[in-house]
Amino acid sequence: MDGNTDGHEAIWQIGVFDAHCHPTDIMASVQEITKMKARVLTVMATRSQDQVLVEDAARMYPGNTREDVSEGASRYVIPAFGWHPWFSHQMYNDVDGGAKATPSAAEHYKAVLVPAPDDAAFLESLPTPRSLRQFLEQTEARLTAFPFALVGEVGLDRSFRLPQGPSVVTEVMSCRCKTGGSEEEYTPGTREGRPLTPYRVTMEHQKAVLRAQLGLAAKLGRPVSVHSVQGHGVVFEVIQNMWKGHEKPSKRERKHKSHAHAHVADDGESGKVNDALPFPPRICMHSYSGPPDALKQFLGASVPADIYFSFSSAINFSNASTTKVTSVIKAVPDDRILVESDLHCAGETMDNLLEEIVLKVCEIKAWSLEEGARRLKDNYLKFLFG
Ligand SMILES: [Zn+2]
């Protein structure tokens, strides 16, 4: 017995599946996963430093079959490989319509940051920009090595600004996570605790980096975890452009076609040997913060991808917007809702946050804990495996 006598044991027995988290930010916490109650953690990569760490975590907790992930008695890490919008400026766009030659660092940063920085010391503190094309190649290799891996964390962020100072220092900070010591070592590159500059990354550049990664997800048929802050309309536009010509037919149109296979392009463009769709099959809007109205476009009848929405106790219920989140959760279809911790360290705190959000969703949806846990589990498995 772990002393839990509050009747919440049911959710852990059915299984709790974290749809989005970052335990590799405190690498020491990854060893705690084995002691956790949550069955599956979907671990996001975000920047140069953590791609290989996410790979390591996935090898430590391999879920090799659907059976493992859904019913196994161990703990499993589902890896996600991608480049977060907070770090999008660190790559130059050398894919579709982007640079032909490698730009100089100053040239690149002046083109993708607003206002264009002319502070030499600040420019020097930024890393040498890397090739987006090369990153896509590396990511494709990683995704191929992990057949259940997702693309993530990718997205758009209208409100973030670049932090000051070199981004490659090792920061040692105190943390709520208990992994043995009072201080935990952060994986380099995080934005934690650094003062902000006035510089933002242009939407054009963020969109190019997002589009390229969504294209990779489409090519390999993988689900995607998307970060969006004040960018839901633009995220929708980007995806919508990808599925042009593949919209689901309306009921009337369907009647006219006896064999309505909505996902297959029926527009005479046959002859294509590759049957991969030009858009990702399943997309999760993580820690979804848009208004209930914005849900409508994602859930429109003609949308050919399955869009999921995940919620976290830490982000969605940490500020004054609780009423808004409650109405959003009510409005999300029962089969499209997921839960997540979005936490930067594994362990007890992560379990607690997951329990909190499962309870909140069950309360708002008026589900019993058992019904809620089952639904959330089914949704996660469908999101992951299709
Ligand atoms: Zn995240």
Image (tube, rainbow, N blue to C red):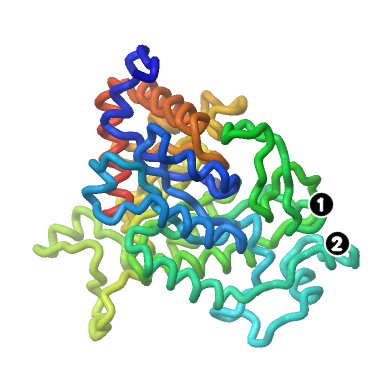
Residue 122's disc number: 2
**Separation of marks 1 and 2 at Cα, in angstroms:** 9 Å
| Quarter of the picture holding the C terminus | bottom left
Which residue is at a point 51% across and 61% down the rendered structure image?
Answer: 82
Q: Quadrant of residue 385?
A: bottom left
Q: Identify the amino acid type marked 2.
A: Phe
Q: Position of residue 63 (x, y in %)?
A: 32, 52
Q: Between label 1 and label 2, give the one nearer the viewer.
A: 2
Which residue is at a point 38% across and 62% down the rendered structure image?
Answer: 280
- Furthest residue in direction top, as rendered: 5
Above or below, 316 relative to 72:
above
The reply to whether discs 1 and 2 touch (Cβ–Cβ < 8 Å) is yes
> Mark 1 falls on what kind of element?
loop
Above or below, 56 relative to 140:
above
Q: Identify the amino acid type marked 1.
A: Thr
> Mark 2 falls on what kind of element?
helix
Q: Quadrant of residue 327?
A: top left
Q: Does the rendering let one see residue 292?
A: no
The residue labelled by disc 1 is 197
Mark 1 Cα-neighbour bin, 10 Å: few <14, some 14–19, many ≥20: few
Which residue is at a point 47% across and 57% down the rendered structure image?
Answer: 56
Residue 251's disc number: none
Q: Quadrant of residue 330?
A: top left
- Which circle's residue, 1 or 2, is located before the other in the chain? 2
Mark 2 Cα-neighbour bin, 10 Å: few <14, some 14–19, many ≥20: few
Q: Position of residue 208 (x, y in %)?
A: 57, 68
